[in-house]
Image (cartoon, helix red, strand yellow):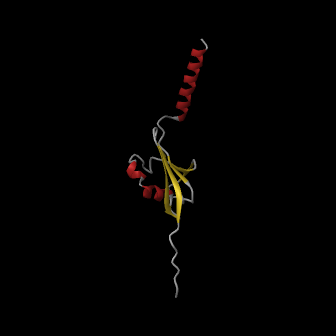
Amino acid sequence: MKFMVKGCNHIKIEIVYALPDTQILEQITIRSGDTAEQAILESGILERFPEITLTNNRIGIFGNFVKPNTILRPNDRLEIYRPLTVDPKKARLLRAQKAKNKSNCSSQ
């Protein structure tokens, strides 16, 4: 009886993590069928940035949120998002107030 042994297929993906002053973008090779969580663990990014946790940081592929058990496809861009530091509604309000104050100052 003959057994066929399949070779381990690999795919390339990008993994991205952005800080206020730095952006990390690396191309890595993972096994076909690996999940987003497996890719993050194997990439070594958690050792470089210990503040990342898969319970606090959401992840996505090309800007769309995904779950850690999502199977990755070739050329996916796996993004690790930082938690928000300011409520988006409050940030918009502050920007609007700042713009209003600026326009009032320039019209005098």
Relative to the observer, which residue lies in front, 74 or 97? 74
The extreme bottom residue here reads 1
Q: Quadrant of the C terminus?
A: top right
- 30 shown above or below 20: below
Q: Estimate the x, y position of residue 66 in percent, counting from the top left.
A: 54, 52
Residue found 46% across the figure and 59% down from its top:
38
Q: Relative to residue 13, is residue 53 drawn left or right?
A: left
How many numbered marks appear?
Answer: 0
Q: In which quarter of the image is residue 73?
A: bottom right
Q: Estimate the x, y position of residue 7 in percent, counting from the top left.
A: 51, 73
The extreme top residue here reads 108
Q: Estimate the x, y position of residue 76 in percent, counting from the top left.
A: 56, 55
Q: Quadrant of residue 93?
A: top right
- 2 shown above or below 29: below
Residue found 48% across the figure and 39% down from its top:
84
The extreme right residue here reads 107
Relative to the observer, which residue lies in front, 91 or 8? 8
Q: Relative to residue 104, is residue 36 drawn left or right?
A: left
Residue found 47% across the figure and 42% down from its top:
83
Residue found 42% across the figure and 48% down from its top:
52
Q: Estimate the x, y position of residue 100 in percent, counting from the top left.
A: 58, 21
